[in-house]
Amino acid sequence: MGAYLLRRLLIAIPSLLGISLILFTVLALAPGDPFGELATNPNVPPEVRAALRAKYGLDDPLLMRYLHWLTAMLQGDWGFSFASRIDVDDLILQRLPTTLFVVGSSQVLALLVAVPVGILAALRPYSLLDQVANTLAFVGFSLPTFFTGLLFILVFSLKLDWLPFVYNADVAATGWRWYWEHLRQAIMPIAVLGLFQAASYTRYVRAAVLDVARLDYVTTARAKGLGEGAVTLRHIARNAMIPVVTLVALQIPAVFGGAIVTEQIFRVPGIGSLLINAMLANDTPVVMAVTFVFACLVVLFNLVADLLYGWLDPRISFR
Amino acid sequence: MAGSTLASPSAEAGAPAAAPAATGRDTWRRFRRHRLAVASSVLLGVMVLGVLVGGLVWPVAIDEIDFSAMLQGPSPQHPFGTDDLGQDLLARMIYGGRISLAVGFAAMLISTLVGVAVGALAGMSRGFLDSALMWLTDLFLSLPQLPLLLLVIYLFRDRLKEVFGVEGGVFVMIVAVIGGLRWMPVARLVRAQFLSLREKEFVEAARAQGAGPLHQVTRHILPNAIGPVIVAATIEVSAAIIAESTLSFLGLGFPPDIPTWGRLLFDAKDHLDVAPHWALFPGAAIFLTVLSINFIGDGLRDALDPRRVL
């Protein structure tokens, strides 16, 4: 297990480096000069500007600048937010738990919906349940999150007045009431994101179960006289989950994309809404850092998926 | 034609030599069996026609401000209602829909072309180039797309606006970025197809007759790999439409004077309580377009994938 973990970690490093290289290339190719304002300011003499450029290494070769940037990012020196007037890493650490909470809960919700529905649909292919589930899945992933979010606000907040539509990180209540208020405001963002993912996951689960259910060892299990429940759960479902894990891992970048949209709609104070607000405020250090954090999160969750894969499939694990 | 069932053997027997035509008819017959896909084609056709010629039928200016008709619901004068400046929403949706759909198709063309090129190159070359291209594909697949999309637009929008003008600059950039970040599934698909097809006997026969790699690809391998690519390209259109709407919805896509459907939603979201129609019409337009394209893709998968013949 230890060696397996280490090897997966070593594989993750080049992809993280590749991602950081792409991010830096985008940044380096971008027009605009961080000291552009100084050039137009008549009170700053050109020598001062040149000294500043030399001090911050702007005239160095590109590779040097990349290495400088990378070491700074790795040391947690992510710069200073122009808009919020605090260090970028502090800002992100404040916001990150909320995003992880919303994204994590929505994934749990998505799997709780998708796995049972997908298995049931695949066990009775082309039945009424299968057709209804299939149609709903199509509707589900054709509804963009920004539109479902607005629909939820319209129905549950404005018409029915059941749920608040602005996420408030500092709930004033204490004790059980605190948990209740948090749950109430988190329901809509989690549901919007979770149901969208559930739609595509349902189709993956259905396809995977259909593939497995036809195999000989399933017939053998039935022939041994095992009950239908045991066959479904122990023999079919567990093996069908292996390709599903891969497909879910491929969806992770899209999940974080969806999180940005949901956070923006419900004003959830996570790193997604931080990214959008930083862009609207031209706060480049924050924009770069948040994008980098998103990239790291994607790599991290791919790693988790790899470990899960090894646990689900003993044939490939820990060699 | 191997593997397909004949619905009407007599009709097939009437045209023995016309293989390509029969294939087309066969495909159409299988597509037709998917009722939702046929209904979706009709719906999508109506919507495309609507945004293309709708401006002739409903010649109202998209920027005609009328403060006496602010935030009105649907009425005979304004079938889809008006926004907070009293502008006619139907006219704005016809104009914006043209751009939303154009972005979808253009981005699909880019992502499919890049994907086919990368996939074909990787599938035909053994060894280093193949692994390098696939490493690049996997790397792009694990990029956080939306943040990167937003980052590129954030950094480059001013420069492109100078070069191409406001509307053209944003269009070129959005299409290029969406297309450039979505080619990976097509590339993987094409490579997988190429890996199995290049070992088939008919390709080997062509090779034995002295066909070069380019000839093998264009005449023998690619035509046989094109079915799944068409299906994937269909899904790319809907994905690109959603991506553009998302960008515009976040306020970082098209500017307010170009009312794409996502941009209309962005403007409408602060007036949900008084003018829900403002959000519902463009939202429903995006939903119906994407839904019908996805169903068409599903129908095409049934029709074009020979393994799935019932």
Image: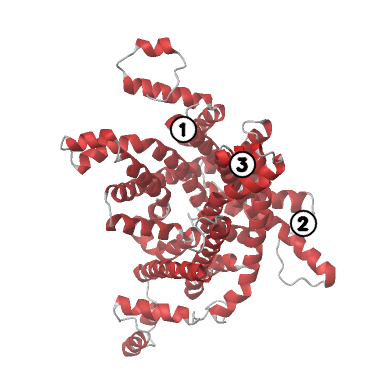
Tag 3: amino acid: Ala
Q: Mark 2 is on which residue type?
A: Leu
> CA separation, marks 2 and 3?
25 Å
**What mark, if any, has residue A163 been given in the picture?**
2
The Cα atoms of the two marked residues, 1 and 2, are separated by 42 Å
Q: Residue furthest left?
A: B210
Counting residues from the start of the chain, the first of labels 2 and 3 encountered is: 3
Between marks 1 and 2 in the image, the one whose residue lies nearer the viewer: 1
Residue corresponding to mark 3: A137
Horizontal side of B120 relative to A264 (left or right) equals left
Q: Quadrant of the N terminus of chain B?
A: top left
Q: Is residue B41 above or below residue A93?
A: above
User: Which residue was labeled with disc 1?
Assistant: B300
Measured as percent of width and height from the top left, residue B132 is found at 32, 59
**Residue B273 visible in the shown view:** no
The answer for which chain carries disc 3 is A
Question: Quick one: label 3, few (<14), some, or many (20+) residues within 10 Å?
Answer: many
Name the spot of residue B82 as percent of width and height, x first.
Answer: 62, 45
